[in-house]
Amino acid sequence: MDMIDREADGSESLEGFIMCHSIAGGTGSGMGSLLLEAVNDHFPKKLIQTYSVFPNNQDGGDVVVQPYNSLLTLKRLALNADAVVVLDNTALNRIATERLQTDNASIAQINSLVSTVMSASTNTLRFPGYMNNDLVGLMSSLVPTPRLHFLMTGYTPLHFHDDVNAVATNVRKTSVMDVMRRLLQTKNIMVSCSTRKDRGCYISILDIIQGEVDPTQVHKSLQRIRERQLCSFIPWGPASIQVALSRKSPYVKTPHRVSGLMLANHTSIRDLFHRICQQYDKLRKRDAFLDNYRKVDMFADDLTEFDDSRQIVQDLIEEYRASESADYINWGLDRAAAAEAAGPELSLHPASADPRMPARGPRGEADER
């Protein structure tokens, strides 16, 4: 933290922090969570955004305790981060196999997809324009309430960085309409959750379109998407896709004229959390692989930290489910009132409080951004 403090002191206008980590391994989950809590504690009024890599749930993973690590990290991401960009290894491997026709994608190729998303999502910050040129402006449009801050991403056209001279696979045109339409397709989403209308709805969408684009094309594309009803939104918020136009980086060669990144807040992200909870419950039912955790002071006496994390993630799942209804705000007020009536010993965790309240740091300060 001393290094971070020195860098922060030397900054003229510190806006926030961006952290990259995995939630399954010991370093990414343990050290990442500790760093996240420390930064939130030292800078309670600064924005914290993370790029969090979720484990591949199909092959069981390389770490047997990844459900434990993932659940503990999800608690910190829910309480200490202001925005979490979810990058799912299951979806990344599927995209590499199906969309880019690679049998066994290497770590470098998967990282290439991740770096493409990170580069595009910060493009408006590095090449600022009239809108979305700071973290607060970028995230405030995507996160309407403090806890619903887990974001999906989609990108098209897809290609590996070592294959820029080839035309992106399965993409024949890169007009604005084609790019915006493909961004809404589940097969291009880098999270293993379906965005079909029967599985959930969008809370917010921000499309970052890169390249030489005529704004009238964007307007026409938005009209056609609205007419075709290609996406459904929550009933209590604006049903519109926000678009930010950005220049291409002059330092990166790309094989297409127009590309796009979608940052979306979708209620089906709860399915990803539900799968992690299911895996955790299977291990916890047998108290499997807990010996190493009991050696740590936090778990030496009891395992209430696990129980608390499990409850917070369950509350997060329920809140995403409740956000699909028109009376979501009343739902949050009712839960807050019930917690207050139950007394301090049974009060709801901040992750389940009034959705209109500002996010709070671990020490309880209101974060007045």
Image: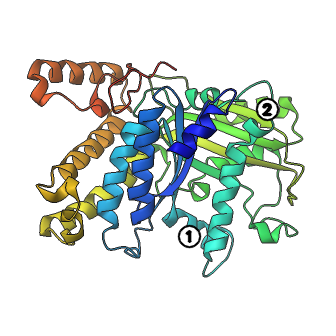
Residue 105 vs residue 82, the one in the foreground: 82
In the current view of this chain or complex, which residue is farthest to the bottom? 103
Image position of 229 (left or right of 341):
right
Residue neighbourhood size for the residue with mark 2, other residues' Cα within 10 Å, grouped as few (<14), some (14–19), many (≥20): some
Q: Residues within 10 Å of mark 1 (few under 14, many from 20)?
A: many
| Residue pictured at 49% horizontal, 31% vertical | 43
Q: How is the image coloured?
A: rainbow
Q: Nearer the viewer, residue 289 or 248?
A: 289
The residue that label 1 is drawn on is 93
For residue 209, which quarter of the picture? top right
The answer to whether mark 1 and mark 2 are in CB contact below 8 A is no
The label nearer to you, 1 versus 2, is 2
Q: What residue type is labelled 1?
A: Asn
Looking at the image, which is closer to me, 341 or 159? 341
Give residue 123's position: percent from left, percent from top: 75, 42
Q: Is residue 164 above or below residue 149?
A: below
The residue identified by callout 2 is 128
Q: Where is residue 235 in the image (x, y as percent from the top left)?
A: 45, 25
Can the viewer see residue 294 in this picture? yes
The answer to whether 250 is drawn above or below residue 326 in the figure is: below
Lateral position of residue 106 relative to residue 295, left or right? right
Q: What residue type is labelled 2?
A: Pro
Instruction: Determine if residue 148 is in view.
Output: no
Residue at x-position 16% and y-position 24%: 339
* Residue 354 in the image, given as x and y percentages of width and height: 31, 22
Q: Mark 1 or mark 2, which has the lower sequence index?
A: 1
Q: Which residue is drawn at 62% across and 30% down?
A: 15
* Image quadrant in which you'd find residue 172: bottom right
Q: What element carries label 2?
A: loop
Q: Is mark 1 on a helix, strand or loop?
A: helix
Query: Residue at left 70%, top 27%?
Result: 12
Q: In this view, does 222 lie to the left or right of 94?
A: right
